[in-house]
Image (spheres, rainbow, N blue to C red):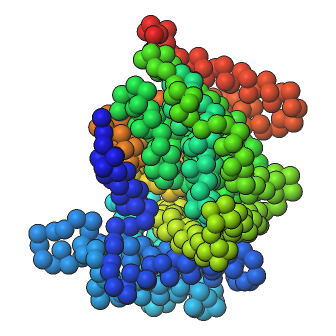
Amino acid sequence: METDKEFEKDIQEAQRIADEAEGGTRHVTGWSRWIVPVLALSWSLFQLSVASWLLLDSTYIRSIHLAFAMSLVFFTHPAFKKQKKNKLLNYFAKTDHYSILDYATVLAAVFFALYLMLDFIGISNRQGAPITRDLVIGFFLVILLLEAARRALGPALPIVATVFILYSFFGPYMPSVIAFKGVSINRFIGQITMSTEGIYGVPLDVSATIVFLFVLFGAMLDKAGAGKYFVDLAFSLLGGFKGGPAKAAVLASGLTGMVSGSSIANVVTTGTFTIPLMKSVGYPDYKAGAVEVACSTNGQLMPPIMGAAAFIIAEYCNLEYFEVIKAAFIPAVVSYIALMYITHLEASKLGLRGVPRNELPKFWPTFVKGIHFTIPLIFLIFELVVLRHSAQLAAFRAIIALVIIIPAQNIITAKKHNMTTVEAAKKSVVQIGEALIAGAKNMMGIGVAVASAGIIVGVVTLGLGGIITEVIEVLSGGNFYLILIITAIASLILGMGLPTTANYIVMASLTAPVIVTLGAQSGFVFPLIAAHLFVFFFGILADDTPPVGLAAFAAAAIAKSDPIKTGIQGFTYDIRTAILPFMFIFNTDLLLIGITNVWQVMWIFLTSVIAMFAFAAFTQGYFTQKNK
């Protein structure tokens, strides 16, 4: 039996993995420890100002957004995560203080990121004809951005971006099938760093105006205690059923996923409670971790945030945001219901029971105790779905609702515990401040990721789009089904090293238009959003795909299991999610495109659930193994 101290160490290890993935590995001392909190707080306040009263040109907002993201990455992530034997290399791996080089790197990154704003008129006047200064600054911006991506996200995204950069210059020397006329250095720098077609493109714009606010909203909910409330609510409702803790994990992760853009954060938030309880009722350690991994990765499918990609999908498909979440709704819910069924099948095979009811919280008292957490969520959905307000306005108003709810919650709690109103006010200020800081720290990786992915998008728009279509057509032999399989495999492989949002941007730029174009040639007519959701779903699955899936490593740390075994088991649970994209690409009714009749929606939902139940039963060996 695991002791409290051992369990605490497991939680700390999982938190360390999450921090390294999203919050950085530096823990400096002295006065410099205030740099990151002040910088993060300033970024959040800037974004809230832009959403409310501060009127700035879109290009200015993107530049400032990128400057904040890069500076935070360089302050929180050393050049190397582990100490080196070489003294020179070890100098760049320091985690307890900042060196002069760190400050110089941050200042350079801020200047290069802001250059488009600082010389906006001049750059606009010489569009397409950059001067030497533009070329030098653009070159170093690309270098520092890729270095920031390497530190925050790992080597995969910088490597992919570098391959595309080299291809843009050496295309003429490639084999004839993939030969490309190439571009000049002037055109490359102008397109990638001095226009809104590359680094400062649509993904960075969406990140700066919408994604930040939703991530901040999720951070504020978490700091207010909503994560613990969702877990308690799920256990009070489902914990007593067969395999109850696993069922509760599915519900809790689904609720958390609605406001979280990260599968790793979801694992740490809910897995801390669900994994030990799953093990206590008899789940093997690796299966307990795998259930949480499958739940948390699928959390990125859940509207309204959808792993921060929903807003970019809306821009790429030229659709209202509401249309995107409407299209994603049935696949996301069906996926979770099927996962709930899988946990039931596992419990039946293993002969597991639920947690005794007397050890679980009561449902109604639990529900009422945290019902105020549902107010901003309901308000957000009302703004988006009923009033059809912009995502930016809806998120801002939901944040304001939370800023009101947090002090009210603390004042009520203070009165119950004989605390003063002043103490409640202090606690509220601290909670809101911590949420503003956490939101910005959660965003730095996304900001750097979308900007780096913008390099790839920019190279594609330089003329590679047609080449990619030809290459995929040659590889598939014109077989459309093979095209989809190639796209799915490519999304999985890329997604092993890329954040979900960056993976989606890259794959959407490379393959989504190809799916639509070649599909039409094969006699299939697909809406563009179906192709975009196809690549998005497979990108999400990469979070539990060995050997890289960080969500699996975080869950394994809590479960004390083998991370590779945990990831493989999690992927087997998620196979049903891999089938869904093929279902809705050929039957777009699942995306509710053109469906207005409520009874038709219910019929589509019911038949989809039945189909997924049958497939889940098949993949879990229900028809070949005896239940206990």
Q: Residue 405, image x and y in percent?
A: 72, 64
Which of these two is toward me, 444 or 111? 444
Quadrant in the picture for residue 108: bottom left
> Which quarter of the rendered picture does the N terminus lie within?
top left
Say above or below: 594 vs 532: above
Which of these two is toward me, 279 or 322? 279
Q: Is residue 554 visible?
A: yes
Q: Residue 199, image x and y in percent?
A: 53, 71
Q: Residue 243, image x and y in percent?
A: 50, 25
Q: In percent of the image, x 51 and y 64: which residue is there?
A: 442
Q: In percent of the image, x 60 and y 38: which residue is there?
A: 361
Say above or below: 398 vs 591: below
Q: Is residue 335 visible?
A: no
Quadrant in the picture for residue 605: top right
Q: In percent of the image, x 77 and y 52: which residue is there?
A: 378
Which of these two is toward me, 104 or 556? 556
Say above or below: 308 vs 527: below
Which of these two is toward me, 137 or 3? 3
